Amino acid sequence: MDRWDIVTIGGGLAASALAKAMADRGARVLVVEREREFRDRVRGEALAPWGAADLATLGLLHDVQPAIAEELRTLRLFVAGTQVSERPFAATTLQRMNWFSFYHPDLQRICLDAAVRAGAEVRRGARVVGIRPGRPPVVSVEQDGRRDEVAARIVVAADGRGSAARGVAGFETRRDPERLLFAGVYVEAVALEPGHFYQFADPAHGQMAYVFPQRDGRARCYVGWNAASGEARLQGEASFERFKTRAEEIGLPHDALAAARMAGPLATFDGADSWVEHPYRDGVALLGDAAATSDPTWGQGMSMALRGARVLRDALAAGDDWDAAGHAYAAEHDRIYAIVHRADCWYADLFMDMSPAADERRARVFPLFLEDPTRLVDVPSSGPESPCDERARRRFFGEE
């Protein structure tokens, strides 16, 4: 039986970042990745400053930034079609950094290549067909018709939002009630000035739209809406014109997408969070979306994945007791995710609730935000180090 220090299930952002960081420290790392080539699946493509800081700490920003990343210097916020603010990120975030936008398959490729250069072994076109937690944990890997068992000091399951490893390894998943839906599509020929994060809010109808410009006139565009509205999902090429119409209704200028063409699939996702409390047991850790899938409406998934990779790296590097390290990682992951989840729910309550009471609250608090932008909870940009306590909640909702 092959024996490794770390075996990762999946080779996406979270797994490759951890693999690179631990291989840099001399660990023997095996990455098992099902896809032979990464392809567009409407994943997140906007990385918040707190995630960008962790990407730098993990030694990957210098690979990503010059190759594929578009730096988004300001937030241009529109409410009901009118621009109400322009926020410079580098001057206002805790990290003194901007948001970054990039094509997700390119990001995966660059980070996985960096892991290989650091010394990790990658098996592509392979899939994990069994997990046996324990000391050591063992995974069964199937590739090209052959099945092997490999043991590790720790198995890290980073197999995404639909993680099969959660159930196989014995973790119990919790889930929020359905509330928001979120659709995204990759487009070319977008007529918006690059270098800015565009957010369009239509709170009265529980809708939100985003445009994240990338290089060469391409962009990832999203629309989100309250499921209670009864609006149909947007799925596939036949829904593209409806997507553009919906985006215009929310506030995008007509010219922005008038000439736009699909450059990737269009799909809608449930916004409800799903997560595992304490994502480590018996030699198996969950990482990234496998540990906690946050509502994509608020763009925290990649930052959570990178923070998880950094926290797990630091825990494993701290000593030889990797079981204790796994528990330390899980405890810190729970703390961070609780803050992100709390902030996301506050934003959903304020911007996406369609009730008369929510309209009254917005009429009270939106003028306060314009007078004092520090009332806005900054977890989505600056991360869990931002204030997100009871006083922050009261200020956010205009209660003091």
Image (spheres, rainbow, N blue to C red):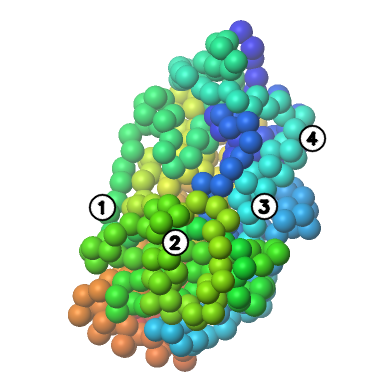
Give the quarter of the figure containing the C terminus: bottom left
Identity of the residue drawn at 26% across and 82% down:
359
Relative to 125, does residue 225 appear above or below in the rendering? below
Q: Identify which residue, 235 or 80, lies in the foreground.
A: 235
Q: Nearer the viewer, mark 2 or mark 1?
A: 2
From the image, tell me which residue sits under label 2: 240
Q: Circle 3 is placed at which residue position?
A: 55
Which residue in the structure is indicated by mark 1?
Answer: 177
Q: Secondary structure at mark 4?
A: helix
Q: Nearer the viewer, residue 338 or 356?
A: 356
Q: Residue at x 51, y 46 (%)?
A: 41
Could you give the CA–CA distance between mark 2 and mark 1, rounded to whole angstroms?
28 Å
For marks 2 and 4 on the same chain, the one whose residue lies earlier in the sequence: 4
The amino acid marked with disc number 1 is Pro
Three-letter amino acid code at the position of disc 2: Phe
Q: Residue at x 61, y 50 (%)?
A: 104
State the mark number for residue 117.
4
Q: What residue sits 39% from the left and 66% below the top?
A: 242
Residue 339 in sight: no
Viewer-nearest of discs 2 and 4: 2
